[in-house]
Image (cartoon, rainbow, N blue to C red):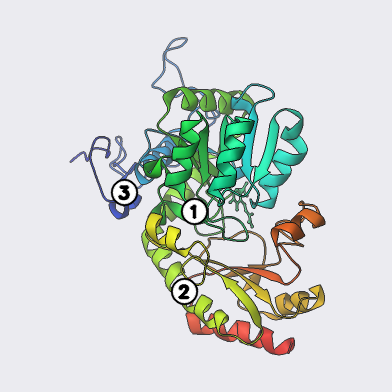
């Protein structure tokens, strides 16, 4: 039997890695697809003598395969896979000693905001800031002396773009580590570690898995010390991903490249269509020339993915509610990054945990609608939105 090696030490392009990294044939049987090691524990021949696996909370061979694949995609030495995106944030908060000063982007996923604002604010000294404003950021970093800068780019839901290279350089000057939540781009379009970030994380629930059937998280780094801390915490606290879910993510990852291209192709057409629509006040899509962060996105990304945010001209919430309930093909649901198109109202749904006043200051208003563009036929998607627009004329 020919034994193909894993890609450790080899340089594959990303498209190849999505299919082959971590994908060596099973040693016992030659199975081309890694087995789902659906086991909680592993037999030892004598106490402490095992084959590298002891207990599935600590390590599992299927999860290891996924970690190997993700490491190749994000160009990282170390990867940890967990049970959700939020558990990654929770582990990171435990890495640092009590009262650590930290800066977090002001427009992050509502659940991330809630975790930092209502749980870890008693443990750490956390401040929120617009990370796209490099000048204000430098003043804050100099004075506040954070040890960690946590940012999303593009942000959720306003799709603000931060210059990763400039920002990580700035943070490093003041000995501050940077974490980029790369959920909205996927490694196919953005690789933050290559741009200077110390950590990159994903809610794998989204583009990484891509099929809306798994909740999962991952964090990657080249820093051994921090990886070891994170692994120790994950093993001690316990948010491990199940072998079956890791296997599903490995399966989903194989089509990452074709999915991302298809998301982006549809999203660009829909964003342009929305921009010219009479009932739309404005559209935010990083691929549009009108987007304030377009130039930076063009420089640091190889594409713009499938998330679009737009504002209805009719500002009252009743119009947004009607619009959202009239679509038939778009599914009204939280989450994003699956092959099916989703639509949602951030103020009522994904970002409801942010106080109304803060939400409005940020621009998460009642007429804001967020789309996750899937890979269906784009004409069907446009037709569906047009029917909803007609109901609020
Ligand atoms: O849902 P979970 O896998 O725990 O991931 C949380 C998370 C982290 N980071 C970003 C940028 C996210 O968008 C999310 C989850 N977001 C949604 C559920 C949403 O609809 O925006």
Query: In the rendering, at what x and y percent does residue 169 appear?
Result: 44, 39
Query: In the rendering, at what x and y percent does residue 94 appear?
Result: 63, 27
In this rendered view, identify the residue nearer to me: 50 or 240.
240
The disc placed on residue 209 is 1
Q: Examine the rendered structure and indicate whether residue 55 appears above or below residue 259.
A: above
Q: Examine the rendered structure and indicate whether residue 184 appears above or below residue 59.
A: below
Question: CB of mark 3 within 8 Å of CB of mark 1?
Answer: no
Ligand 1 closer than 8 Å to label 3 CB:
no
Q: Examine the rendered structure and indicate whether residue 339 appears above or below residue 72.
A: below
Structural crowding at the residue carrying mark 2, measured as other residues with C-alpha within 10 Å and reported as few (<14), some (14–19) or many (≥20): many
Residue denoted by label 3: 17
- Point 30% across, 39% down: residue: 29
Q: Quadrant of residue 128?
A: top right
Q: Quadrant of residue 213?
A: bottom right
Q: Is mark 2 on a helix, strand or loop?
A: helix
In this rendered view, identify the residue nearer to me: 358 or 318.
358
Q: Distance between the residues labelled 2 and 1?
A: 22 Å
The disc placed on residue 268 is 2
């Amino acid at each position: 039997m020919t034994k193909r090696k894993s890609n450790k030490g080899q340089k594959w392009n990303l498209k190849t890695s999505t299919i082959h990294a971590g994908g060596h044939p099973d040693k016992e049987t030659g199975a081309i697809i890694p087995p789902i090691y659906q086991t909680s524990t592993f037999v030892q021949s004598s106490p402490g003598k095992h084959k590298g696996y002891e207990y599935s909370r600590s390590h599992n061979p299927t999860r290891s395969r996924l970690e190997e694949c993700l490491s190749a995609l994000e160009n990282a030495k170390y990867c940890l896979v967990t049970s959700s995106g939020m558990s990654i944030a929770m582990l990171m908060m435990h890495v640092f000693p009590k009262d650590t000063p930290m800066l977090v982007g002001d427009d992050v996923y509502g659940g991330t905001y809630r975790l930092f604002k209502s749980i870890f604010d008693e443990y750490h000294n956390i401040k929120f800031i617009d990370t796209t404003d490099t000048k204000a950021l430098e003043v804050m970093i100099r004075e506040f002396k954070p040890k960690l800068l946590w940012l999303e780019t593009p942000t959720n839901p306003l799709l603000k773009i931060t210059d990763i290279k400039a920002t990580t350089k700035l943070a490093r000057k003041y000995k501050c580590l940077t974490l980029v939540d790369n959920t909205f781009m996927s490694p196919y379009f953005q690789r933050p570690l290559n741009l200077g970030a110390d950590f990159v994380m994903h809610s794998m629930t989204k583009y990484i898995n891509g099929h809306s059937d798994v909740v999962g998280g991952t964090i990657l780094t080249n820093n051994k010390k921090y990886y070891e801390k994170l692994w120790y915490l994950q093993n001690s606290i316990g948010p491990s991903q199940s072998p079956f879910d890791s296997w599903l993510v490995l399966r989903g990852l194989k089509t990452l490249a074709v999915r991302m291209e298809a998301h982006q192709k549809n999203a660009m057409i829909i964003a342009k269509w929305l921009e010219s629509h009479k009932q739309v006040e404005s559209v935010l899509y990083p691929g549009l020339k009108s987007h304030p962060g377009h130039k930076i996105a063009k420089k640091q990304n190889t594409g713009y993915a499938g998330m679009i945010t737009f504002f209805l001209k009719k500002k009252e919430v009743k119009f947004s509610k009607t619009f959202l309930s009239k679509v038939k093909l778009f599914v009204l649901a939280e989450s994003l990054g699956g092959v099916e198109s989703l639509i949602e109202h951030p103020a009522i749904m994904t970002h409801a945990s942010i106080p109304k006043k803060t939400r409005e200051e940020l621009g998460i208003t009642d007429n804001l609608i967020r789309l996750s563009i899937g890979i269906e036929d784009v004409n069907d998607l446009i037709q569906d939105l047009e029917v909803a627009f007609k109901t609020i004329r």
